[in-house]
Image (tube, rainbow, N blue to C red):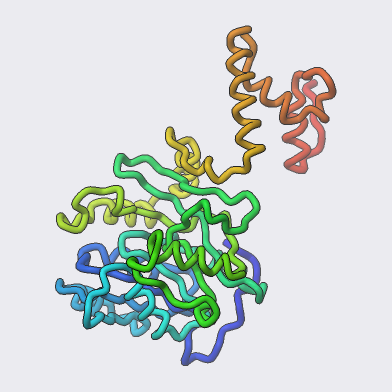
Amino acid sequence: MSSSPLPDTPTAAAPVVTVVVQTYNRSNILPYAIGSVLWQTYRDWELLVIGDSCTDDSAAVVGRFTDPRIRFINLDERVGDQSGPNNEGVRRARGRYIAYLNHDDLWFPDHLEQVLPVFNDGSVDVVFTLPLEIDADGRFRVNMVYPDELYDPRGAPPISSWVVRRDAYARWGLFRHRDECWSVPTQDWLFRAWRRGAKILHLSAPTVFVINSAQRRNTYAERQDAEQHRWYGAIRDEAGLRERALAAAMSHPKPTHLRMLPSRVLVKALALRLIARCALALKLEPEAVYFYFTFPKRWGFLPQRGAIIRELYRRRGLPPWTKK
């Protein structure tokens, strides 16, 4: 949990945050998305569930939630992508900040609490967090890393990880329809805002659980909801889930987040990989080779046994310790 102060709360008539959930005929998963908003530790929000002209029972499902902060709005005409519901959310939002949540994704309870303090810097327009994505085969994935904590257009942070200052739309415009975009409306908007000078920051806190429907066949037609049910319960009940998921994501066999690393880091990683293979061929320990290149100034010209432990003690602020 963040210990930084949150932005000042406005009058009781207007919440600090407007949460927008865009949806289309997935009423069976809406309770999980709404539930992950309800369990937020930061409480000053309103929730707009906006249907892209839904024809199922979405209105009735949302209506079962008696919290007065939750409203359902159904567009009269279907737009066919997120731009329509999201733009309607921007138009109806009363909060100073707009947070988005795809109807098939989930937030960890501290999502808003983690993000909002970043806006204490009045120059920040958008903040996005680190999404934990679950593949259809059950593997966790991190699709991007931002070492400098600034948006890089080579990555595509899902909108469920965004919080946007509402007045940013007056400067950068609304979402464009898919037919006007080279990519998807969400990433198109983020790129356009960045190119025109928006300050977009990455918060390296894993606060979003992404269940990407694009990776799952027939998810709408079959109204799949087993994963939402499973992972909603896991977030609620399993202590340490986030830490285990993050550790698994970083060891994904297809680590697509590597494309976000600077070239010098990738070159060094490839060089160390080659050196490690040579070390194995010489029956040397590859990890020792890695540590030698990682802490050369601490070790001197030649490796020293126990040097990495001393370094870890130093980094952790522990006093030096020598085995007696």
* Any part of residue 273 in sight: yes
Which residue is situated farthest in the top direction here?
282
Asked whether 29 or 157 is in front, the reply is 157
Which residue is drawn at the image coordinates 40% and 43% (left, top)? Answer: 140
Left or right position of 5 against 154: right
Tell me if residue 49 comes above or below residue 28 in the rendering: below
Percent coordinates x, y for residue 171 in the rendering = 55, 79
Which residue is drawn at the image coordinates 59% and 43% (left, top)? Answer: 261
Which residue is drawn at the image coordinates 77% and 25% (left, top)? Answer: 307
Percent coordinates x, y for residue 12 in the rendering = 49, 90
Q: Quadrant of the C terminus?
A: top right
Left or right position of 156 against 261: left
Q: Quadrant of residue 124?
A: bottom right
Q: Quadrant of residue 235?
A: bottom left
Count of numbered badges drawn on the protein? 0
Asked whether 93 or 256 is in front, the reply is 256
Tell me if residue 279 comes above or below residue 108 in the rendering: above
Q: Quadrant of residue 285?
A: top right
Left or right position of 141 against 123: left
Tell me if residue 59 comes above or below residue 249 in the rendering: below
Q: Quadrant of the N terminus?
A: bottom right
